[in-house]
Image (cartoon, grey):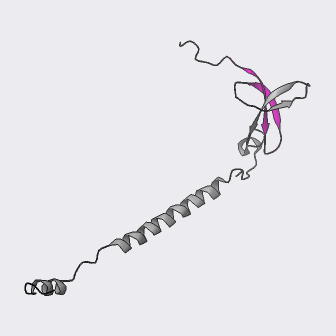
Amino acid sequence: MKKDLHPNTYRPVVFQDLSNGWSFLTRSTAPTEETVKWEDGNEYPLVKVHISSASHPFFTGQEKLLDIEGRVDKFKARQEAAKAKADAMKKAANKTRVKEPKADETQKIGSLKPGQR
Protein backbone atom coordinates (compact mmCIF):
# COMPACT_ATOMS: atom_id res chain seq x y z
CA MET A 1 0.00 0.00 0.00
CA LYS A 2 1.24 3.52 -0.83
CA LYS A 3 2.38 5.70 2.05
CA ASP A 4 0.66 9.03 2.70
CA LEU A 5 -2.20 8.16 0.34
CA HIS A 6 -4.99 9.10 2.73
CA PRO A 7 -5.28 12.54 4.31
CA ASN A 8 -4.53 12.85 7.99
CA THR A 9 -6.29 16.19 8.56
CA TYR A 10 -9.59 14.79 9.84
CA ARG A 11 -11.37 17.21 12.16
CA PRO A 12 -14.92 17.77 13.39
CA VAL A 13 -16.94 19.70 10.78
CA VAL A 14 -20.57 20.88 10.70
CA PHE A 15 -22.46 20.24 7.44
CA GLN A 16 -25.52 22.43 6.88
CA ASP A 17 -28.26 21.70 4.33
CA LEU A 18 -29.21 24.98 2.64
CA SER A 19 -32.65 23.79 1.52
CA ASN A 20 -34.05 23.13 4.99
CA GLY A 21 -31.43 24.30 7.51
CA TRP A 22 -30.70 20.84 8.95
CA SER A 23 -27.15 20.49 10.30
CA PHE A 24 -25.03 17.64 11.57
CA LEU A 25 -21.57 17.30 13.09
CA THR A 26 -19.15 14.72 11.73
CA ARG A 27 -15.46 14.28 10.94
CA SER A 28 -14.18 15.41 7.55
CA THR A 29 -11.22 16.78 5.59
CA ALA A 30 -13.41 19.16 3.54
CA PRO A 31 -11.75 22.59 3.27
CA THR A 32 -13.77 25.61 4.38
CA GLU A 33 -13.26 29.18 5.58
CA GLU A 34 -16.55 29.56 7.47
CA THR A 35 -17.18 28.55 11.06
CA VAL A 36 -20.31 28.09 13.16
CA LYS A 37 -21.06 27.74 16.86
CA TRP A 38 -22.48 24.26 17.50
CA GLU A 39 -24.97 23.07 20.14
CA ASP A 40 -22.16 22.09 22.55
CA GLY A 41 -20.86 25.68 22.60
CA ASN A 42 -17.72 24.98 20.52
CA GLU A 43 -16.96 26.58 17.18
CA TYR A 44 -16.47 24.23 14.21
CA PRO A 45 -15.76 24.68 10.49
CA LEU A 46 -18.96 24.93 8.43
CA VAL A 47 -19.57 23.27 5.04
CA LYS A 48 -22.79 24.25 3.25
CA VAL A 49 -24.46 21.68 0.98
CA HIS A 50 -27.46 22.07 -1.34
CA ILE A 51 -28.94 18.65 -0.62
CA SER A 52 -28.52 16.05 2.11
CA SER A 53 -30.35 12.99 3.38
CA ALA A 54 -32.78 15.33 5.16
CA SER A 55 -33.94 16.92 1.88
CA HIS A 56 -33.23 14.31 -0.81
CA PRO A 57 -36.46 12.81 -2.25
CA PHE A 58 -35.06 9.26 -2.04
CA PHE A 59 -34.67 9.52 1.75
CA THR A 60 -37.73 11.68 2.47
CA GLY A 61 -40.16 9.80 0.22
CA GLN A 62 -41.38 13.05 -1.35
CA GLU A 63 -40.89 14.07 -4.93
CA LYS A 64 -40.03 17.73 -5.24
CA LEU A 65 -38.02 19.70 -7.74
CA LEU A 66 -34.87 21.31 -6.39
CA ASP A 67 -33.35 23.57 -9.01
CA ILE A 68 -31.30 25.88 -6.82
CA GLU A 69 -28.70 26.76 -9.41
CA GLY A 70 -31.11 27.09 -12.36
CA ARG A 71 -29.71 24.11 -14.25
CA VAL A 72 -32.74 23.81 -16.51
CA ASP A 73 -32.64 27.53 -17.36
CA LYS A 74 -28.91 27.34 -18.11
CA PHE A 75 -29.49 24.35 -20.40
CA LYS A 76 -32.29 26.09 -22.30
CA ALA A 77 -30.19 29.25 -22.67
CA ARG A 78 -27.29 27.22 -24.10
CA GLN A 79 -29.64 25.52 -26.57
CA GLU A 80 -31.07 28.86 -27.74
CA ALA A 81 -27.59 30.38 -28.08
CA ALA A 82 -26.41 27.41 -30.14
CA LYS A 83 -29.44 27.67 -32.43
CA ALA A 84 -28.93 31.42 -32.88
CA LYS A 85 -25.26 30.88 -33.70
CA ALA A 86 -26.12 28.17 -36.24
CA ASP A 87 -28.68 30.47 -37.90
CA ALA A 88 -26.17 33.32 -38.04
CA MET A 89 -23.55 31.06 -39.60
CA LYS A 90 -26.11 29.89 -42.18
CA LYS A 91 -26.98 33.48 -43.11
CA ALA A 92 -23.31 34.41 -43.37
CA ALA A 93 -22.64 31.39 -45.58
CA ASN A 94 -25.52 32.34 -47.90
CA LYS A 95 -24.22 35.91 -48.25
CA THR A 96 -20.68 34.87 -49.12
CA ARG A 97 -21.59 32.36 -51.82
CA VAL A 98 -20.30 33.32 -55.26
CA LYS A 99 -22.93 33.46 -57.93
CA GLU A 100 -21.92 31.09 -60.69
CA PRO A 101 -22.69 32.21 -64.27
CA LYS A 102 -25.49 30.40 -66.04
CA ALA A 103 -24.85 28.31 -69.15
CA ASP A 104 -26.22 31.10 -71.41
CA GLU A 105 -23.81 33.65 -69.94
CA THR A 106 -20.77 31.40 -70.43
CA GLN A 107 -21.62 31.04 -74.11
CA LYS A 108 -21.87 34.81 -74.52
CA ILE A 109 -18.47 35.30 -72.88
CA GLY A 110 -16.90 32.68 -75.14
CA SER A 111 -18.43 34.25 -78.29
CA LEU A 112 -16.87 37.65 -77.72
CA LYS A 113 -14.18 38.68 -80.15
CA PRO A 114 -10.79 39.67 -78.79
CA GLY A 115 -10.82 43.20 -77.42
CA GLN A 116 -14.61 43.22 -76.72
CA ARG A 117 -15.91 43.36 -73.18
In this picture, residue 114 sits left or right of residue 66: left
In this picture, residue 46 sits left or right of residue 75: right
Name above or below for residue 99 compared with residue 31.
below
Name of the residue lying farthest toward the front:
115
Q: Which residue: 13% across, 85% down?
A: 107
Name above or below for residue 117 compared with residue 98.
below
Bounds of the magenta span? 6-30
x, y percentage for residue 116? 12, 87
The image quadrant that residue 59 belongs to is top right
Name above or below for residue 89 compared with residue 43.
below
- Residue 9 falls within the magenta-colored stretch: yes
Name of the residue lying farthest toward the left:
113
Q: Which residue: 10% across, 83% down?
A: 110
Question: 58 or 104, which is in the foreground?
Answer: 104
**Quadrant the C terminus occupies:** bottom left
Q: Which residue: 75% across, 45% down?
A: 61
- Residue 108 falls within the magenta-colored stretch: no
Name above or below for residue 27 compared with residue 53.
above
